[in-house]
């Protein structure tokens, strides 16, 4: 059984994130989305709400599971019996950021293998930030983020 962990803030989850997770299912049996409980990063939504939105978004997709952790991603991966971490790449900015992230991660665990999947053209301009800006401006985010995210903004 090939398992990969997909860590991120998912603040909120977008269709770009979902696309990466689905594409990973072509090479892995299980994709474990790990919602980071990161105190240092000022999150728009609480960890619980971010987790709930992801959970609803992947309901019914075989092979995708959702978790959150207070601890380190590398420790979670070890606990789940994998050394693969999934990340999505949209552009050069992501690439530079990912280089940094990989370096830091390898300081914690040199056995981690990163798997990078390129964003589909259709989703490469979607970010949590622009979904948030549009939703807060009252714009329709259909196509950019899952229904669970849309509902959460409508409740606000
Ligand atoms: P983090 O705070 O760890 O960067 P994010 O939730 O912002 O977490 O992103 C998680 C991963 O998903 C990152 O590798 C990011 O580059 C990738 N990602 C974000 N948006 C997209 C998108 N539209 N298409 C493909 N990958 C994406």
Image: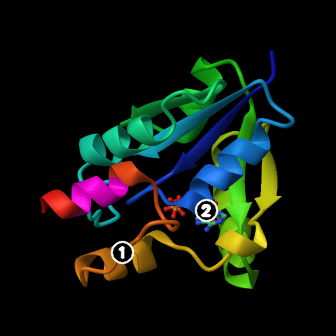
Q: Nearer the viewer, residue 91 or 105?
A: 91
Q: Is residue 80 visible?
A: yes
The residue carrying mark 1 is: 140
In the rendered image, the residue lying farthest to the left is 156
The correct choice, above or below, for 149 with respect to 85 in the image is: below
Expressed as whole percent of the image width and height from the top left, the position of residue 85 reads 70, 42
Q: Residue at x 48, y 31 (%)?
A: 59
Asked whether mark 2 lies closer than 8 Å to ligand 1, one says: yes
The correct choice, above or below, for 5 with respect to 124 in the image is: above
The disc label shown at residue 16, or none: 2
Expressed as whole percent of the image width and height from the top left, the position of residue 120 reads 76, 67
State yes or no: residue 97 in magenta.
no
Kindly indicate the quadrant of the structure image that contains residue 62: top right
* Stretch of the chain drawn in magenta: 149-153
Asked whether mark 1 lies closer than 8 Å to ligand 1, one says: no
Q: Residue at x 69, y 39 (%)?
A: 109
């Amino acid at each position: 059984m090939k398992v990969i962990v997909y860590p991120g803030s998912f603040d909120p989850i977008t269709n770009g994130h979902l696309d990466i997770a689905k594409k990973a299912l072509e090479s892995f049996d299980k994709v474990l989305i790990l919602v980071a409980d990161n105190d240092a990063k000022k999150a728009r939504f609480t960890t619980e709400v971010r987790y709930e939105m992801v959970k609803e978004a992947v309901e019914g997709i075989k092979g995708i599971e959702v978790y959150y952790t207070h601890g380190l991603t590398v420790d979670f991966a070890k606990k789940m019996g994998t050394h693969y971490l999934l990340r999505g790449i949209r552009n050069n900015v992501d690439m530079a950021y990912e280089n940094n992230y990989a370096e830091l991660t390898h300081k914690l665990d040199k056995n981690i293998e990163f798997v990078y999947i390129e964003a589909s053209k259709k989703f490469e301009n979607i970010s949590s930030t622009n979904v948030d800006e549009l939703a807060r401006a009252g714009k329709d985010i259909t196509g950019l983020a899952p229904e669970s995210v849309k509902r959460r903004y409508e409740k606000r």
